[in-house]
Amino acid sequence: MMTDTRARQQSKTAILVVDVQNDFCQGGALAVPHGDRIVPVLNHVILETQHFGVPVYASRDWHPADSTHFRVAGGPWPVHCVAGSEGAEFTAPLRLPSATHILDKGIDQNGDGYSAFEGRLHDGTLFEEHLHTGGIDRLVVGGLATEYCVRHSVLDARGRGLRVTVLTDAVAAVDLKPGDGNLALEEMRAAGATLRRAVDTNFLA
């Protein structure tokens, strides 16, 4: 567990859990290979930080049924994470705190919604605005999938001047082309993100 001193030093840090939804997990419409393996790691990260009140944000794809993101409408992907569907719900083994800030993204018919920075809270507040209001300047990120929504979210965070730590054991890649996930991690590192394993190190260091 973190010390109180270290927790105070990290008071401007937030956890970002990206798209750990049924349709991206085993048996889902667009399952990420080995995606389920990251859930225990994310649960560990959340548990380790909640004693100190570190806020948690969780993004989710929340597509309209007629989204042009879908292959049936000319997009690249099978139908997945339709707003209000079972596939769009967070996977049950993921232990999100009751105070988690939920970010809905991909809500526009003509938008892909890859980045959490396109997401809005239930009251319409943009993610970036909510972070600014809370004085948060650092994100610790895990989720699905490495080369898509995680990558876009991390690069957008770095582009906004936020410090970012990507938990490499808390992400998983689609790897349509073998190695896509590793290339995305290197791109995030090159953009200034720190790469760490949650199980091996103090991920808030």
Image (spheres, rainbow, N blue to C red):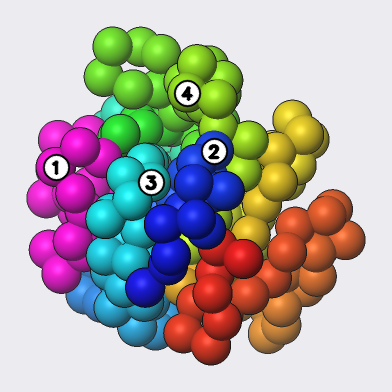
Read off the residue under disc 4: 134
Near mark 2 (Cα within 10 A), the count class, few <14, some 14-19 or many ≥20, is some
Q: Name the kind of residue labelled 3 in the image.
A: Val
**Point 33% across, 22% down: residue:** 121
Read off the residue under disc 3: 54
Check disc 1 and report its element: helix, strand or loop: loop
Give the mark nearer the N terminus: 2 vs 3: 2
Question: How much space separates mark 4 and mark 3, taking CA atoms?
Answer: 11 Å
Image-quadrant location for residue 166: bottom right
Over which residues does the magenta segment extend?
78-100
| Main secondary structure found in the magenta portion | loop
Near mark 4 (Cα within 10 A), the count class, few <14, some 14-19 or many ≥20, is few
Dots 1 and 2: beta carbons under 8 Å? no
Give the mark nearer the N terminus: 3 vs 1: 3
Question: How much space separates mark 1 and mark 2, taking CA atoms?
Answer: 20 Å
Give the mark nearer the N terminus: 1 vs 2: 2
The C terminus: image quadrant: bottom right
Dots 4 and 3: beta carbons under 8 Å? no
Dots 4 and 2: beta carbons under 8 Å? no
Question: How much space separates mark 4 and mark 2, taking CA atoms?
Answer: 8 Å
The total number of labels drawn is: 4
Of residues 21 and 40, the one drawn nearer to the viewer in this rendering: 40
The N terminus: image quadrant: bottom left
Question: How much space separates mark 3 and mark 1, taking CA atoms?
Answer: 13 Å
Read off the residue under disc 1: 98
Read off the residue under disc 2: 12
> In front: mark 1 or mark 2?
2
Check disc 2 and report its element: helix, strand or loop: loop
